[in-house]
Image (cartoon, rainbow, N blue to C red):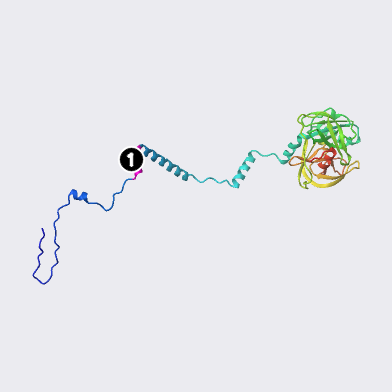
Amino acid sequence: MKRVALYSSSRTSLPQVATVTTEPAPTAADAASTVSPFPSPKRPRLLGWLSRHPRVSAGLALLLCGGLGFVLALFAQPAPWRVTQGDIDNAVRQSLEKHPLPSRAAKAYEAVSASVVRVYGYGQADEVKPVRKAVDKAKKDAAKGKAGEDESSDEREEGTAIGTGVVITEQGAILTNLHVVSGTSRIKVLFADGTESEAMVVGRDPRNDLAVLRASTLPDDLKPATLASTRDLRPGDEVIAVGFPFGFGPSTSSGVVSGLKREFRSPTGNVLSNLIQFDAAANPGNSGGPLVTMDGAVVGIVTAILNPVDQRFFVGLGFAVPIENAAAAVGVPPF
């Protein structure tokens, strides 16, 4: 029901009063018939499906949690330790302190020792007398209490020359010095494994003071030495000399190559040329033994020592025939 607005008779206008219309309250039917311009959001199908399958939902939740934990653990691990050169050097140093390696000379000797033989020459030749005197002196010194070793009965025979040889072929060819066996009536050799055998000279090279021996009996495990060319040999290179100085041995001494292409005149007047000069100790009995590099290869045959006096002991000048010359005496190229 509308109300009629009242107006004052005064000329001053009063504020107009809005007409108030009383409307009935909306009913439930009216509310239901009202349509919202914004549609209500629908529930995703996956969530609806998961709500109907709680066990699957729980399994997926556990799987997601496990994967998340793995990723977090992976990123939580510290960065891998990078190995530096200093770490490697420290490890090698500690290992060598606990297990020191053998010296280079020891490894060279080990490589050639099985190929070195002891040579006995029996007879009255002038060539054997100086060596025999030196051996006799060594025996007397040993009898006085100095370090020495027992000698066999054969070594005590008059006129025995003691020298050294080295096996250079699988067939058992033995290189030694010609002056060790020259003029002897009988030759015997003793191999590294203890095999003892008669031997005979099958080749001679007087120009290089070399002889080739062939033993009648050879060891089952005969091992020839490795030969190396002297082409790359230089003064200052380390070498060892292996032999039976004064009958003691096998003995080894180490030194360096002192020079190349040297000449030497032997006491008999024979001139040897193209020799290797070395300073590894060598004495009577070393003759015919191998001169060996640090990798265990034979590069020469020890043939002489130089001494300005008559005592024939070592003063630092030794000479060896290059292996190329020595192999030529065998008649087989060494390389």
Residue lying furthest bottom in this view? 11
Judge left or right: residue 145 versus residue 18: right
Let me know if residue 89 is in the magenta part: no
Q: Amino acid at mark 1?
A: Ser
x and y percentages locating residue 326 in the rendered image:
83, 40
CA neighbours of label 1 inside 10 A, class few (<14), some (14 to 19), many (20+): few
Where the C terminus falls, by quadrant? top right
x and y percentages locating residue 82 in the rendered image:
56, 46
Magenta residues (range): 44-54
Residue at 91 percent across and 36 percent down: it is 126
x and y percentages locating residue 28 in the rendered image:
18, 48
Q: Is residue 284 visible?
A: no
Residue closest to the eye, 303 or 135: 303
Residue at 61 percent across and 44 percent down: it is 88
Q: Quadrant of residue 148?
A: top right
Residue at 41 percent across and 40 percent down: it is 63
Residue closest to the eye, 53 or 137: 53
Residue lying furthest top in this view? 153
Dot 1: element: helix
Residue closest to the eye, 198 or 71: 71
Residue on which the image places disc 1? 51
Where the N terminus falls, by quadrant? bottom left
